[in-house]
Amino acid sequence: MDVRRRPSKALRPAPKEPSSAPEPTGAKASDALPLPLYFTNALFFTLFFSVAYYLLLQWRDKIRNSVPLHVVTFSELAAILSLIASFIYLLGFFGIDFVQSFIARASNEAWDLIDEEEGEDHRHRLMSCSPSIADHIIPAVSSAEDEEIVDLVVKETIPSYALEEQLGDCKRAVRIRREALQRITRRSLQGLPLDGFDYGSILKQCCEMPVGYVQIPVGIAGPLLLDGFEYIVPMATTEGCIVASTNRGFKGIYASGGATSTILRDGMTRAPVVRFPSASRACHLKFFLDNPSNFQTLADEFNKSSNFARLQGVQCSIAGKNLHMRFSCTTGDAMGMNMVSKGVENVLAYLRNEYPDMDIISISGNFCSDKKPAAINWIEGRGKSAVCEAVIKEEVLKKVFRTNVATLVELNMLKNLAGSAVAGALGGFNAHASNIVSAIFIATGQDPAQNVESSHCITMMEAVNDGKDLHISVTMPSIEVGTIGGGTQLASQSACLDLLGVKGASKEVPGANSRLLAKIVAGSVLAGELSLMAAIASGQLVQSHMKYNRSTKDVSKVGS
Ligand code: ADP
């Protein structure tokens, strides 16, 4: 069975679906009104001040005419009710924030006073004795026993990192660590969620000493029509425009008949560095490794620790007495860093017997090269090397992108090729590949640090079909992705992989899922390049950023 599938129509984003999500707990009264916020605010302000003015005038007349104040007419009664209603609305809207900021300020001032006057001990006592102030900075732990543990962590009697192991309860450990952190720093973690996350799933795998999790919105773009199949692509980002722009690119590719992709190469690398007493001894090992007749011996050693890691080759580089050996292997559906490292360790153990004067300096000597810009990845590739192309029709360029072939070809030449050349770019011959790569990486549980080399991309554009249509391609030599291992097994990341039909290990062909994911990344980059370049060509870039990527909130109020 092919791992690819056509998502049903139901998976596609429906236009304007009413949200069934519950109201956020912090919802205000105004949220319920079907009117714009500024309109309801203006309405209630006007109502409040006009009825207040009216009532004051009425009461002044009553006092002048000696009419008792408690005798009210029907219109005065209506005015009083309107006054109360508008007061409640305004209090609900502005009052809650004011009261909260007032309490937070009061509690911070309380801490400053205590520190100045009575020292640290009293602070601890206040923490446990006066929840009315402390609770606004930190939520209380659930039991007296937890309270004691928090105290021990604050005093460093229990190391924070050991909580999971000592308590045997990940969530409780996180709650206690978080509480202790807030007490030590006197900074509130309010806003960083605690609940709603399976902390057991990251233990000894994804993150140490957790205190919560950061929320990143996931948008969807698509369908991407790639090699005859449709994919809805999840993208995790906080940069407005990225999803919308990629979606527009997908639309143009779809309308032009889709994109085609090819995986050129698939191999993860690890390059240890070893030292010899002389350069000639280092060269001796290099010649041994270069000799094809020794390959099988090396492969037998390398492959023995995994069912999926299969040695492809070793590339050597000499630096005086030092030898850098870049091992490359297939890794099934895993991104493969662990596998390749284990294989390299096996070979080094074997080589040490053959070369007793060899000194192993490091399992990684940066010739790999992981998470750093390096020409070796750009030229030789690392992970999956992919190329993806499409022919965009003239009418699609006009209708969807409001530009034309000649403008795009010229822009690509001056910006992505000449511009990047004068900038001395290394793999950066593109408009914004890393925007799309990192958004998909985060959504699908890839290592975001590998965005450095995974975003290497050269975007080419050429006029075809007598200059009427545009041939666009992206070539990406180092897409480092996996569908098993690392962050891919976490619930939300796994759901995003499932949406693409590439969750977990491929049952039929090991490596098919991760290769397909690399193709989807390349296809999405193709869409992103097309859309952004068109936006620049037609002068829409600034406009769309003003619309989608500009905070309407007063960010000057956000303090540090
Ligand atoms: P990485 O090498 O990317 O860090 P891990 O070594 O953490 O990945 O995870 C890969 C694990 O998944 C290995 O234990 C491997 O044996 C197992 N596995 C099961 N099926 C596959 C598959 N199809 N491809 C790769 N690994 C697989």
Image (cartoon, helix red, strand yellow):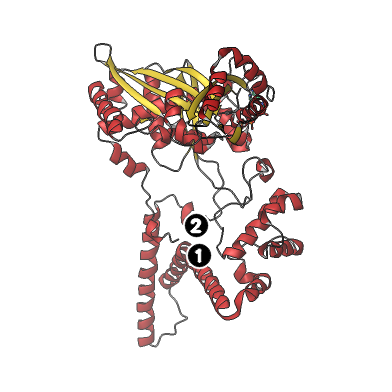
- Residue 155's place in the image compared with 304, above or below, is below
The location of residue 416, given as percent across then percent down, is 31, 29
From the viewer's perspective, is 528 left or right of 314? left
Residue 256 has which mark?
none
Q: What residue is at 66 percent from the left and 27 percent from the top?
A: 346
Q: What residue is at 46 percent from the left and 56 percent from the top?
A: 30
Residue 96 has which mark?
1
Disc 2 packing (10 Å; few <14; some 14–19; many ≥20): some
Disc 1 packing (10 Å; few <14; some 14–19; many ≥20): some
Whether pointer 2 and pointer 1 mark residues with C-beta atoms closer than 8 Å, the reply is: yes
Camera-side mark, 2 or 1: 1
From the viewer's perspective, is 507 left or right of 231? right
Ligand 1 image-quadrant field:
top right
- Residue 68's place in the image compared with 1, above or below, is below
Figure quadrant of residue 183: bottom right
Q: Who is closer to the viewer here, 52 or 447?
A: 447
3D distance between C-alphas at marks 2 and 1? 9 Å
The location of residue 64, given as percent across then percent down, is 35, 87
Q: What residue is at 37 percent from the left and 69 percent from the top?
A: 49
Which of pointers 2 and 1 lies earlier in the amino acid sequence?
A: 2
Q: Can residue 554 be seen here?
A: no
Mark 1 residue element: helix
Q: Can residue 277 be seen here?
A: yes
Q: Name the residue under label 2.
A: 28
